Image: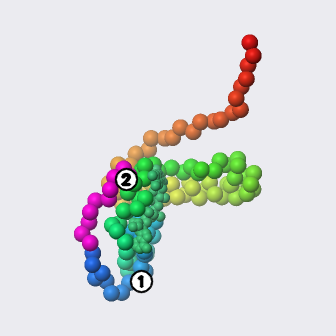
Amino acid sequence: MGGGRAPARPRAAATAKRADVVIVGGGLTGVAAAWELVRGGRDVVVLDAIEPGEGASSRNAGMLGRHSKHAFIDLAATMGLDTARAFFGELREIYDGAVKRIQEEGLDCDFRKCGRFVGALSPPITTSW
Ligand SMILES: Cc1cc2nc3c(=O)[nH]c(=O)nc-3n(C[C@H](O)[C@H](O)[C@H](O)COP(=O)(O)OP(=O)(O)OC[C@H]3O[C@@H](n4cnc5c(N)ncnc54)[C@H](O)[C@@H]3O)c2cc1C
């Protein structure tokens, strides 16, 4: 994942005349939704204006994490502790779900768990000698 242009795939002319669900956009979001729908027995067509994965999905850095741009403490202060807990709980579920899917489906995406350094910031310490 990440770092380059999506490999060119044969363009599927619109052969399907009917589908249970038509998804516009074949990036991570559209394909993940299609995957779930197909597993649930739906007939799905994914349309993309360019190539599947041509957008951000083939250009991202390839990091899979359960972190947010918002610090837990900030979210708790603005939205409340329960909301902050629920939000970070969902991040955990999404991460676990992605890892499970990669492992169960044997997705060839160079996935490996390597941890992440999260630095703890503190106010600058001033000293006078
Ligand atoms: C530089 C960069 C680095 C990133 N790094 C990370 C990272 O390390 N980890 C991480 O988790 N996330 C990262 N992200 C974010 C992540 O890539 C995006 O959140 C994710 O790819 C979004 O997927 P998407 O399917 O919603 O959109 P996209 O991948 O952009 O897919 C949308 C698709 O819809 C198609 N489309 C759009 N409009 C139409 C239309 N009208 N008709 C038909 N098709 C259409 C496009 O061609 C495209 O293929 C990064 C993003 C960028 C830009």
Q: Quadrant of residue 82?
A: bottom right
In this rendering, the answer to whether 94 lies above or below 30 is above
Which element carries disc 1, helix, strand or loop? loop
Locate residue 31 relative to residue 92 in the image: left or right: left
The residue depicted at 59 percent of the width and 58 percent of the height is 90
Instruction: Tell me the tag on residue 1.
Output: 2
In reply to whether residue 10 is colored magenta, the answer given is yes
Locate residue 93 relative to residue 107 in the image: left or right: right
In the image, the segment drawn in magenta is 1-11
Dominant secondary structure, magenta: loop
In reply to whether residue 85 is colored magenta, the answer given is no
Residue position marked by numbered label 1 in the rendering: 20
Residue type at tag 2: Met
Q: Residue 88: x percent and y percent?
A: 62, 54
The residue depicted at 70 percent of the width and 49 percent of the height is 74
* Pick the front one: 81 or 58: 58
Give the CA distance from mark 2 to mark 1: 29 Å
Q: Quadrant of residue 19?
A: bottom left
Tell me whether the residue at label 2 lies in contact with that at label 1, contact meaning CB atoms closer than 8 angstroms: no
Extreme-left residue of the structure: 10
In this rendering, the answer to whether 15 lies above or below 59 is below
Q: Quadrant of residue 44?
A: bottom left
